[in-house]
Image (tube, coloured by chain):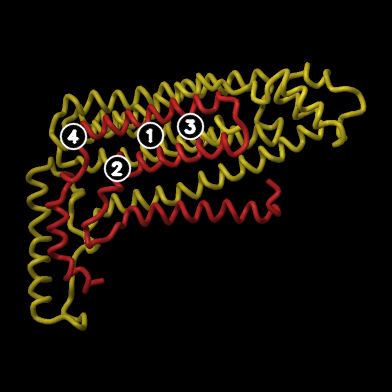
Chain colours: A red, B yellow
C-alpha cells in the first residue's frame, strides 16, 4: 500500500489537475437529454404498435440499454472515467455490481428450472 | 487512506523515500490551507489518496454497485412473479383475475372452467380481447412521469456544472428544479398506487401485486431519499457552504440521482412497456 502511495504521488497531482474539466459541456448535456427524450417517445410508440414476441421485446430492450449507457456514460461521467492510472475504477466497480446482479438473476431462474 | 510511506517498507530506494517525504509534507500543508479557505470545513474532498481517486466518490460507486444487486433481485422477483401470475391467470384462478380485471371478469368465467387448464387458454384470450391484459397500467401517464424523471437528471448535471463554475444562482435554480421534478414523479407514483389499489391490485392480494409494489415502492423510496439530499444541498447553498470547492458533494448526490433515474429506465421498459 505504502509502495503504491509513493509511486502514485505524481498521479495525485494529476488527479487535482484533471478535475472536472474533462466532463461534457452544457450543450452536450442537452443533446444527450434530447436523445433520451426521443428514445423514450419511440419506446412508448413501439409499445402501441400492437406487435408481440421478439418484434416487440427486442427493440424495447435495445432502446432501454442505449438509454442506460447514455445516462451512465455521460450524466454519471463514466465515459470520462479514465486517465487516472490508466484504469477505469468507477466503471469497474459499477460493472461488478451489474454483472453480479445479472448473474443472480440467472441463478434464480435456473433454480426455478427456467420456468419463466 | 492517506499517503504515508515508512522507511520500514522494503523495496524503496532513496528517490522513493524523497518522494514520500515530499508527499507527507504536502499532506501536512493541506489541512492548513483548507481551513483557511473553507469556513473551517474539516472534509477535504480533493485530498490526494493512495489510489489517486476521491474516497468519497469511490464509496458512492461501491454503494451504487451494491444497489445494482438490490434492484437486480427485485426485478428478477418481479419477472418470476409475473410469469407465475400469468400461469395462474391462464389456469383461471379467480383471485388473480379479480385482482387484475375486477369482479366482472370473474363472473364472466364459465362454470367449471376455474382451476382447469383445458379450454382456459381460449377463455383467457377472449377475456384479453375484451378487457385487454393490462387495463391497469396507464402508459401515457407513466410515460409522462418517466420523462419528468429523465429531465430531472438533466437539471442535476446542470446544477453540478453551475457549482463547478461558481454560478450559484443557476446552481440553486437547477437544484430546486431537480427536487421539484423528483417530487412530481413521486406524486405521480402515489396517484398511480391509489388508483391501482382502488382497482383491486393490493399488496397482499396476489404475487404480482406484492412484486410490483415492492419493486416500484423501493424505487420510490430511493427517489424520496434523493429529494431529501437535494433539499439539504439547497440549504447548504443558501448558507453559502456549497461553493465551487465542494462541487464533488453535488456530483455525489448527482451520481445517486442518475442511478435512481437509470433504474427507472429499466423498470419503465420491463414493467410497463413489455406486457
Judge the density around disc 3: few (<14), some (14-19), many (≥20) Cα neighbours within 10 Å. many
Is the residue B180 above or below the residue B23 in the image? above
Considering only order in the chain, which callout, 3 or 4, is on the residue closer to the N terminus?
4
Residue B85: quadrant of the picture: top right
Q: Secondary structure at mark 2?
A: helix
Judge the density around disc 1: few (<14), some (14-19), many (≥20) Cα neighbours within 10 Å. many
Which residue is label 4 attached to?
Answer: B163
Q: Quadrant of the C terminus of chain B?
A: top right
Q: Nearer the viewer, residue B7 or A101?
A: A101
Is the residue A88 above or below the residue B232 in the image? below
Considering only order in the chain, which callout, 2 or 1, is on the residue closer to the N terminus?
1
Residue B227 percent location from the top left of the image: 37, 30
The Cα–Cα distance between marks 1 and 2, rounded to whole angstroms, is 11 Å
The Cα–Cα distance between marks 1 and 3, rounded to whole angstroms, is 10 Å
Q: Share a chain, discs 1 and 3?
A: yes
Q: Share a chain, discs 4 and 1?
A: yes
Numbered badge on residue A24? none
The Cα–Cα distance between marks 4 and 1, rounded to whole angstroms, is 18 Å
On what subunit does the disc labeled 2 rest?
B
Q: Secondary structure at mark 3?
A: helix
Which residue is label 1 attached to?
Answer: B226
Numbered badge on residue B220? 3
Considering only order in the chain, which callout, 1 or 4, is on the residue closer to the N terminus?
4
| B181 with respect to A115 (left or right) | left
Q: Secondary structure at mark 1?
A: helix
Q: Share a chain, discs 4 and 3?
A: yes
Considering only order in the chain, which callout, 3 or 2, is on the residue closer to the N terminus?
3
Amino acid at each position: 500500500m505504502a509502495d503504491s502511495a509513493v509511486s502514485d504521488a505524481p498521479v495525485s497531482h494529476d488527479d487535482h489537475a484533471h478535475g472536472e474539466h474533462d466532463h461534457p459541456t452544457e450543450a452536450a448535456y442537452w443533446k444527450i437529454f434530447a436523445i433520451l427524450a426521443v428514445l423514450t417517445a419511440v419506446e412508448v410508440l413501439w409499445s402501441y404498435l400492437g406487435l408481440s414476441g421478439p418484434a416487440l421485446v427486442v427493440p424495447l430492450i435495445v432502446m432501454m440499454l442505449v438509454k442506460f449507457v447514455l445516462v451512465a456514460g455521460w450524466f454519471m461521467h463514466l465515459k470520462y472515467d479514465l486517465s487516472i492510472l490508466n484504469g477505469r475504477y468507477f466503471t469497474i466497480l459499477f460493472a461488478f455490481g451489474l454483472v453480479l446482479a445479472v448473474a443472480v438473476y440467472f441463478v434464480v431462474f435456473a433454480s426455478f428450472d427456467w420456468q419463466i | 487512506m492517506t499517503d504515508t510511506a515508512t522507511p520500514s517498507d522494503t523495496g524503496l530506494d532513496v528517490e522513493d523515500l524523497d518522494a514520500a517525504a515530499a508527499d507527507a509534507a504536502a499532506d501536512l500543508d493541506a489541512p492548513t490551507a483548507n481551513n483557511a479557505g473553507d469556513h473551517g470545513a474539516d472534509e477535504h474532498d480533493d485530498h490526494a489518496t493512495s489510489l489517486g481517486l476521491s474516497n468519497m466518490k469511490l464509496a458512492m460507486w461501491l454503494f451504487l454497485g451494491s444497489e445494482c444487486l438490490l434492484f437486480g433481485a427485485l426485478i428478477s422477483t418481479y419477472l418470476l412473479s409475473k410469469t407465475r401470475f400469468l400461469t395462474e391467470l391462464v389456469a383461471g384462478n379467480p383471485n388473480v383475475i379479480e385482482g387484475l380485471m375486477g369482479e366482472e371478469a370473474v363472473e364472466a368465467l364459465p362454470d367449471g372452467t376455474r382451476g382447469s387448464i383445458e379450454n382456459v387458454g381460449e377463455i383467457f384470450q377472449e377475456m384479453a380481447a375484451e378487457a385487454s391484459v393490462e387495463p391497469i397500467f396507464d402508459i401515457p401517464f407513466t410515460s409522462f412521469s418517466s420523462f419528468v424523471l429523465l429531465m430531472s437528471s438533466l437539471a442535476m448535471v446542470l446544477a453540478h456544472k453551475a457549482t463547478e463554475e461558481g454560478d450559484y444562482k443557476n446552481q440553486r435554480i437547477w437544484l430546486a428544479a431537480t427536487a421539484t421534478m423528483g417530487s412530481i414523479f413521486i406524486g405521480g407514483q402515489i396517484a398511480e398506487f391509489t388508483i391501482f389499489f382502488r382497482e383491486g391490485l393490493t399488496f397482499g392480494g396476489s404475487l404480482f401485486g406484492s412484486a410490483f409494489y415492492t419493486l416500484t415502492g423501493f424505487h420510490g423510496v430511493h427517489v424520496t431519499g434523493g429529494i431529501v439530499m437535494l433539499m439539504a444541498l439547497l440549504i447548504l447553498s443558501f448558507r453559502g457552504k456549497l461553493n465551487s470547492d465542494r462541487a464533488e458533494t453535488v456530483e455525489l448526490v448527482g451520481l445517486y440521482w442518475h442511478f435512481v433515474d437509470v433504474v427507472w429506465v429499466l423498470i419503465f421498459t420491463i414493467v410497463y412497456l413489455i406486457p
